[in-house]
Amino acid sequence: MPHHHLPPVVVQTGLDQAWRDAEEADSHDPLAPRRDRFALADGLVYLDGNSLGALQPSVATRIQQLVTDEWGAGLIRSWNDAGWVDLPGRVARQIAPLIGAEAQEVAVTDSTSTNLFKAIGAAWMLQRDHLGGGERRVLLTDDANFPTDVYVARSLAALVGGLEVRVVPPDELMAALDTDVAVVAVTEIDFRTGRRHDAPALTAAAHAAGALMVWDLAHSAGVLDVDLHAWDADLAVGCSYKYLSGGPGAPAFLYAAARWHRQLANPVAGWFGHAAPFAFDLAYTPADDAARFTNGTPPVLSMAALETAMDAFAGLEAAQLQDKATDLTSRFIALVDAAGTELEVVTPRDPARRGAQVSLRHQDAYALTQALIDRSVIGDHRPPDLVRLGFAPLYVRHVDVVHAVAHLVSLLRSGDWDQPRFHARQTVT
Ligand SMILES: *Cc1c(COP(=O)(O)O)cnc(C)c1O
């Protein structure tokens, strides 16, 4: 049967059968219709939803209408009439089921970095003020963590005084849990390699050692079967411009387990976290749920973009997202292995031990990434030597996986990746 619709690069690299298998998988994929919500150019393979999720045209329409009608015409009245004041709560209801939480345990606010400061700070104050853990002076994290997470922990330690940030390799976290540890704060998915922590086991170990557990779900929410209740997590934070597709700089989220609500204090308390902001009372009475972790006026434009973007997840279970992500990453790894190139898959091969990304080691990963982008296969580079590709289950197809591998193989066989223009460094990699 002629396959005139096969991209030429697929034929050139002999991946015809792999393409047909992928088409078959796409035809049975229950998430396939969700891709139609997104605006992805023909021929574009977008494997960077882990850095910036793709746009849905419905979001552009919503923002246009909000600016023109609600801000332009409605003005201040829109806080009530257009429901702006309830936006963070509505988005919390959308995010909660994807992370195994109740809506009142989720605050949608600020950046992930700021939420980390509040979450780790609140956990530390909970230890000191309510759990008798004031003698515990260590914040424990791992050296594969995202740098902002470590910066935040260190700035908190500098502010509090007498706290130590203990940074150990990921597989030494358990051994580093002693009676000095007040809070463990790590990221579930290693942003470089895609390695996944055993969250239930680490949370249980932290609790057994008397520590509180804070999870960073930046590369987990919207793509993995996150279940904060089942893990028994104390606090968590996450990002909404990555797999949740909320748009560049979209507000992040903070989870606080209901069992701690009354005892948790926001270290950056502000009027929007007050039980009655418009009472303008100088005495601070926090909201009785996770809303106490908001502080200032919500960013209505980006919050509304996120709300509309989250419609793409309506009715989906986190397990479905993870199943599709696993299928995509497994297909990708198998094809890279079969191609026999010099690329090394650094992401764990056990699907239970990885996120929705695959990272490939290459001695000149920056140039190879640029060459891929030049061929409309968009991933990113993480130094020193990784090509990082994310497989967002809502809009990446199985045929996209084959297309990406075909371009990788073609670039490496031809040496086309090694052109001077692909070596020129830009600011955002
Ligand atoms: C992306 C990411 C962040 C981003 O934090 P921002 O404050 O939103 O810039 C934080 N932590 C991890 C682990 C991330 O991957």
Image (tube, rainbow, N blue to C red):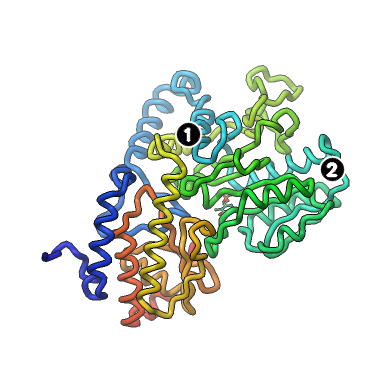
**Residue 230: percent from the left, percent from the top?**
60, 41
**Residue 402: percent from the left, percent from the top?**
31, 65
CB-based contact (under 8 Å), mark 2 and mark 1: no
Crowd around label 1: few <14 · some 14–19 · many ≥20 (10 Å): some
Does label 1 point to a residue whose CB lies under 8 Å from ligand 1?
A: no
**Residue 50: percent from the left, percent from the top?**
47, 54
**Which quadrant is home to the N terminus?**
bottom left
Kindly indicate the quadrant of the structure image that contains residue 292. top right
- Residue 38: tell me if it is visible: no
Which residue is label 2 attached to?
133
Element on which disc 2 rests:
loop
Element on which disc 1 rests:
helix
**Amino acid under disc 2:** Gly
**Amino acid under disc 1:** Gln
Determine the residue positioned at 32% across, 55% down. Answer: 397
**Residue 79: percent from the left, percent from the top?**
50, 23
Which residue is label 1 attached to?
94
The mark total stands at: 2
Crowd around label 2: few <14 · some 14–19 · many ≥20 (10 Å): many
Q: Is residue 190 left or right of residue 45?
A: right
Kindly indicate the quadrant of the structure image that contains residue 16. bottom left
Q: Residue furthest left?
A: 1
Q: With respect to residue 17, does 221 lie above or below? A: above
